[in-house]
């Protein structure tokens, strides 16, 4: 969701060298981005861990001789990093008590707190006279990565003629964001039976049991790649899908960036603030009074997810497939 802001910075500073500071888990998303010249890894669990690590990182940034730091993150930590790095111009929202650390401190308005994250970032830049260049997301998959994804599929006996539907039953941050695994399994059975789809189950290293549960319920026309791919491999495989069905997650935004038709299931999180930005994305949510609560674990009965039925998701999936792919 930061890539439209990065593109706006590139448009306004076409001859600048633009470097992104990113933590390891998100760093691969910025690979091959034409608006970025360099990436510095913020190794917060290794070389940059703790107070001494933060000072070490500040020294590394200082050695680069940056003229401007644009802080898309709200935390005071990022403002401290660039302040001690001696970067002369420091732009960011004056949240978290960090306004005194910034040279260009942008105040928040009530509207800023109720908009999509993309608009939040672009709005900050516009207040600093950095004009936007649209809201489209940037995620570039290389020809080599596409070929590698095809080889992964071939290793599972999947050809380019198969209708691939990706599902992502996992989600970071907590179980409140996750639709019931049993319903994902029932959905996959219906999609396989009625739409003749091959199901790819996405997830991280800790989701293998979840993926196995759904894969076994779906039968031989499904593959469980939970924890078996890198982030870049997972993204390249999403690009091969005719439909992606997911909880609110990073992979949801990847599908939106790749223009892959998708169904995004929302419960505890705010679809207005973090929903996928793409006309091919369909959001399904239950209109319950406690949503969005933004909690990691549901303190009551998880009604925001339980009220989303298999048929609700299946009918939307069927409509998408019939509209775009099935004669």
Image (cartoon, grey):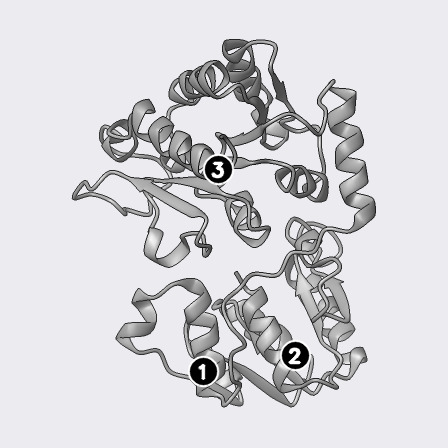
What is the distance, in whole Å, between disc 1 and disc 3 at their CAs?
Answer: 33 Å
Name the residue beneath numbered marker 2. 10
- Residue 173 visible at all: no
Observer-side mark, 1 or 3, equals 3
Residue 259 on image: x %, y %: 55, 50
Q: Residue at x 52, y 83 (%)?
A: 101
The circle on residue 72 is: none
Q: Residue at x 57, y 23 (%)?
A: 199
Name the residue beneath numbered marker 1. 99
Would you identify the image quadrant in which residue 94 lies? bottom left
Dot 1 lies on which element? helix
N-term-proximal mark, 2 vs 1: 2
Observer-side mark, 2 or 3, equals 2
- Residue 68 visible at all: yes
**Is residue 209 rendered to the left or right of residue 277?**
right
The local crowd at label 1, few if under 14, some if 14 to 19, many if 20 or more residues have their Cα within 10 Å, is some
Name the residue beneath numbered marker 3. 171
Image height of 259 relative to 11, above or below:
above
Dot 2 lies on which element? helix
Residue 280 on image: x %, y %: 46, 49
User: How many marks can you see?
Assistant: 3
Q: Give 140 or 228, whichever is nearer the viewer.
A: 140
Would you identify the image quadrant in which residue 202 lies? top right
Q: Give 146 or 249, whichever is nearer the viewer.
A: 146
What is the distance, in whole Å, between disc 2 and disc 3 at their CAs?
Answer: 32 Å
Dot 3 lies on which element? loop
Q: Give 8 or 203, whichever is nearer the viewer.
A: 8
Q: Residue at x 71, y 33 (%)?
A: 229
Contact check, label 2 and label 3, Cβ < 8 Å:
no
Residue 172 on image: x %, y %: 50, 40
N-term-proximal mark, 1 vs 3: 1
Q: Residue at x 28, y 30 (%)?
A: 308
């Amino acid at each position: 969701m930061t890539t439209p802001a990065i593109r706006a910075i590139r448009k306004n500073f076409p001859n600048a060298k633009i470097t992104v500071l990113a933590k390891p888990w998100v760093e691969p998303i910025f690979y091959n981005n034409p608006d970025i010249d360099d990436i510095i890894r913020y190794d917060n669990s290794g070389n940059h861990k703790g107070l001494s690590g933060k000072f070490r990182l500040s020294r590394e940034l200082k050695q680069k001789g940056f003229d401007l730091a644009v802080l898309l993150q709200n935390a005071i930590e990022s403002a401290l990093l660039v302040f001690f790095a001696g970067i002369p111009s420091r732009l960011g929202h004056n949240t978290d008590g960090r306004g005194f650390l910034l040279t260009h401190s942008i105040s928040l308005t009530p509207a800023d707190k109720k908009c999509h994250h993309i608009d939040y970032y672009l709005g900050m830049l516009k207040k600093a006279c950095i004009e936007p260049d649209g809201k489209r997301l940037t995620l570039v998959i290389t020809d080599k990565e596409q070929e590698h994804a095809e080889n992964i599929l071939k290793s599972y006996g999947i050809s380019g003629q198969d209708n691939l539907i990706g599902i992502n039953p996992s989600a970071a941050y907590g179980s409140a964001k996750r639709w019931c695994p049993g319903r994902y399994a029932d959905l996959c059975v219906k999609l396989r039976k009625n739409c003749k789809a091959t199901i790819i189950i996405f997830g991280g290293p800790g989701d293998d049991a979840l993926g196995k549960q759904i894969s076994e319920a779906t039968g031989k026309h499904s593959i469980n790649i939970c924890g078996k791919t890198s982030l870049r491999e997972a993204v390249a495989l999403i690009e091969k899908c005719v439909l992606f069905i997911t909880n609110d997650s990073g992979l949801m935004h990847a599908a939106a960036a790749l223009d892959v038709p998708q169904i995004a299931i929302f419960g505890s999180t705010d679809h207005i603030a973090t929903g996928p930005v793409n006309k091919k994305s369909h959001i399904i949510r239950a209109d319950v009074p406690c949503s969005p609560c933004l909690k990691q674990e549901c303190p009551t009965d998880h009604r925001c997810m339980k009220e989303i039925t298999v048929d609700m998701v299946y009918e939307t999936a069927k409509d998408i497939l019939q509209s775009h792919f099935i004669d």
